[in-house]
Image (spheres, rainbow, N blue to C red):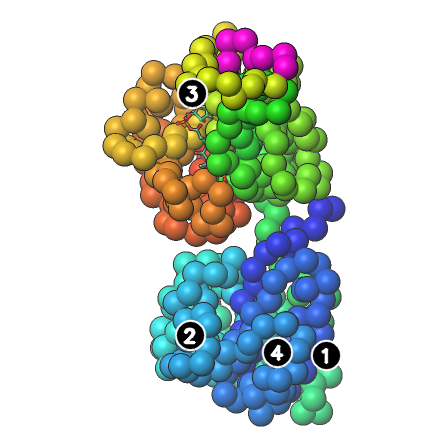
Amino acid sequence: MMNTLQGKRILLGISGGIAAYKSADLTRRLREHGASVRVVMTRSACEFITPLTMQALSGQPVHVELLDYKTEGAMGHIDLARWADVILVAPASANFMARLAHGQADDLLSTLCLASSVSITLAPAMNQQMWQNPATQANVTLLRDRGVTLLGPATGGQACGETGPGRMLEPLELVDALARGFISDRLSGLKLVITAGPTREAIDPVRYISNRSSGRMGYAVARAAAEAGGNVVLVSGPTQLHQPERIRCQPVTTAAEMHDAVMREIEDAEIFIAAAAVADYRCSQAAIQKIKKDNDELTLLLEKNPDILAAVAARKLPPFTVGFAAETENLLNYAQQKLFNKKLDMIAANQVGMNQGFDTEDNELQVIWSGGSIKLERAPKDRLARQLIRLIADRYHEKNTTQTH
Ligand code: PMT
């Protein structure tokens, strides 16, 4: 199974309870799996385990106070809420669950849970009577109904000497459950061809025309598609990125090579996603030798490259075809035109500029299809990619059900 925790940002909340000591090992295990962990502790958690321990294990400052000028300077509480891919509260005490169920924001951890749009997972830990109390059970129902995931509690001997349900799951059980939460099988059995990165068009043996695409967006989409069970072929222009695991990579340099690689792979693909920034033009005749700078002016004759996205969409039996639109102005208009002119199923439009879209950690997307559109708010590219893949999977399955009925 692929390691779905690699690169994930986990906000680990620790509330007060004896099981807090297990959160130290949990942090270590999560980091061993490649996740970044930032720890937020309630004040009563600090009675059971010190922030210093958690700071040493997470390698990051630990946050306790809602308004702390030191940590706010480094990463404010709203930034922290935006940073996370998932919030895991372990241990989640009866008191913390009650506060969360009733929407209280009277400390940093409960405020973060309210201020974040990512999923919340709780690992309850408490005395068995407290767990079974109707008040706690009512809170559990309320939280579950709102989409909060509960892992555990386990049944067994408790620190207080009693036996029953209320023990926090062991760190490795929590790690496995969290990893499974990042997997979905929405794309299982489907082949996806995804393009990423820039292309390079030679001017002479040492110079080329290219653009500022880093490949991050396309690679994030490829990883998200593989996490969702897809069989992914990534056709990538030159980038500095590592080849993602469980993904077949086809490295290319020019637009013509990208076109040929896509056409070879597309025959049996169900979904095509064009995230690459393909050079629109190439030199009609690249010079065989290095061009000398003898003249004050140099004219290059350029000719149009093949439009890979349009070529895929124009096939007799096209796959579900998703384009990107990178625009510096009139984003929505141009994106709509591309959706229509190229006969696409969906388009993800991003505003680009000097510090926007290209070669950045974050992005924001306006996703448009024939029946609707949705704005995916600014977020790290990995998270946006997962949201985009969910949309693509939904629309793909919707289209296929309507076509087969
Ligand atoms: O790589 P990053 O640094 O993470 O940056 C991400 C990104 C900004 C490059 C990415 O989000 C993005 O917008 N990719 C598409 C960039 C682009 O070339 O957009 P466009 O509007 O010029 O092209 C429209 C669509 O046609 C794109 O899906 C493109 O892949 C496709 N195309 C364009 C020209 C061509 N010859 N063949 C194509 O397939």
Q: Could you say which disc has been placed on residue 156 in the image?
A: 1
Q: Residue at x 69, y 89 (%)?
A: 159
Residue 244 placement (x, y as % from top left): 67, 41
Q: Are marks 2 and 4 in contact (CB under 8 Å)?
A: no
User: Which region of the structure is painted magenta?
Assistant: 281-289
Q: Is residue 188 above or below residue 299?
A: below
Mark 1 crowdedness (10 Å alpha carbons): few <14, some 14-19, many ≥20:
some
**Disc nearest the viewer among 2 and 4:** 2
Q: Residue at x 49, y 50 (%)?
A: 361
Cα–Cα gap, marks 2 and 4:
17 Å
Q: Is residue 324 magenta?
A: no
Query: Does residue 233 appear in the picture of this structure?
Result: no
Cα–Cα gap, marks 4 and 1:
30 Å
- In the picture of the structure, the residue carrying the numbered disc 2 is 73
Q: Secondary structure at mark 4?
A: helix
- In the picture of the structure, the residue carrying the numbered disc 3 is 296
**Disc nearest the viewer among 1 and 2:** 2
Q: Quadrant of residue 167?
A: bottom right
Q: Are marks 4 and 1 in contact (CB under 8 Å)?
A: no
**Disc nearest the viewer among 3 and 4:** 3
Mark 1 and mark 3 lie on one chain; the one further toward the N terminus is 1
Residue 102 placement (x, y as % from top left): 37, 75
Q: Is residue 309 above or below residue 39?
A: above
Query: Which amino acid does the dot numbered 4 rest on?
Result: Gln
Q: Could you say which disc has been placed on residue 55 in the image?
A: 4
Cα–Cα gap, marks 1 and 2:
43 Å
